[in-house]
Image (spheres, rainbow, N blue to C red):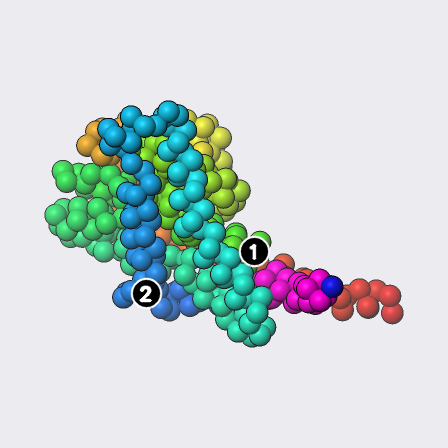
Amino acid sequence: MFVCSHLSRLLPCALSHWLLPLPWTALLACLGVLLDRIAGEPRHAHPLVGFGRVASHLERRMNRTDVEAAGSNRFGGTWHRFCGCVAWAVMVLPPTALALWLIAHLPFALACALHVLLLWFALGARSLHDHLTPIAQALAAGDLTLARRLTARIVSRDTTDADAAALARAAVESALENGNDAIFGALFWFALAGGPGALAFRLINTLDAMWGYRTPRLLAFGWAAARIDDLANWLPARLTAATYALCGDSRCALHCWQTQAPSWDSPNAGPVMAAGAGSLGVRLGGAARYHGRIESRPVLGSGAAPAATDIGRAQRLVRSALAVWLATLAVLGLVAALAPALTVLQHA
């Protein structure tokens, strides 16, 4: 009886600290975006670096693909999928549960501060800008060597012999796709589940970036990471694509989304990049080298191949979309805050 009574008193408090009213969600989202813009990502001892090291170590330990392991494995890829599911749960669930527990037990003001910090951790708008701007500057200056080195930091494709057009295309694709992964997906899950939701999304997205490749080693083990990321990103990606369309050439963006996105390999990157490319009036996709082999990707968008100046245009499109998201949250929060007063006036 004592335990039940204690839980009945604790649960409403925990929910009020976690599932915030819409006005508070809008305010804290704006504060998180502002903190990311001012501070950017931590330059030293970034928590994701440690998370990545643990994930890499866990993958090496659990994803044994040597002859001995294969000989003792009766179920082939099924066993590796199971190990991937367990590894995913180990990496994502405890940090998310800890964030929920802290928010439930902290005073409301400190819980709000933690919400903001978790959103800041999940966002990457400033980091995206800091990585893309030097690439545009190097291309504008004709320094292909520097541009290749900078581009290799943000994409998984091989940039060793990439020309200026290929580097500009890679940077624009990264701006559009990471606009969803590093900004809008985190904001979407923050709006639904506060800081813990944004944290879980960032961890899910990171594991997909590490384990979600269709290589012989990761195809089975990374299956869970890739599929869960697809689910977590499904609605945010389409909202991102719609916002890209709203902020540019809407007719072309919607046409490219409808006709080109289904042919793209990723169910979420396709709509985002097709709508973004159509909105900007540039042509993305085409051949690119991944893991030592050339992949022929469908064409996305319409118009000429992107140039160095289009990297800045892609960044401005992402910033405009972010302004739309924050303005929408602010309006919804204001309406929710004024709703009780309007109800009283109606009954007066």
Q: Is residue 310 above or below residue 337?
A: above
Q: Residue at x 27, y 66 (%)?
A: 44
* Residue 160 in the figure: left or right of residue 190: left
Q: Residue at x 50, y 39 (%)?
A: 231
Q: Residue 300's spot in the image, x, y percent?
A: 37, 33
Kind of residue at badge 2? Pro
Is 25 contained in the magenta span? yes
Callout 1: few (<14), some (14-19), or many (20+) C-alpha neighbours within 10 Å?
A: some
* Residue 143 in the figure: left or right of residue 110: left
Kind of residue at badge 1? Ala
Residue 87 sits in quarter: top left
Local SS, label 1? helix
Q: Is residue 12 visible?
A: no
Q: Which mark is residue 193?
A: 1
Q: Is residue 141 above or below residue 260?
A: below
Foreground residue among 13 and 337: 13
Q: Residue 132's spot in the image, x, y percent?
A: 28, 53
Foreground residue among 95 and 280: 95
Magenta part, dominant SS: helix
* Residue 294 in the figure: left or right of residue 54: left
Precedes in sequence: disc 1 or disc 2: 2
Q: Is residue 348 visible?
A: yes
Q: Residue 236's spot in the image, x, y percent?
A: 50, 45
| Residue ID for mark 2 | 42
Q: Residue at x 53, y 42 (%)?
A: 235
Q: Residue 19's spot in the image, x, y percent?
A: 61, 60
Q: Which mark is residue 297?
A: none
Foreground residue among 48 and 145: 48
Task: Give the magenta-colored segment's residue range.
Answer: 2-26
Calculate the distance from the C-alpha at mark 1 to the C-alpha at mark 2.
Answer: 24 Å
Is 27 contained in the magenta span? no
Q: Residue furthest right?
A: 348
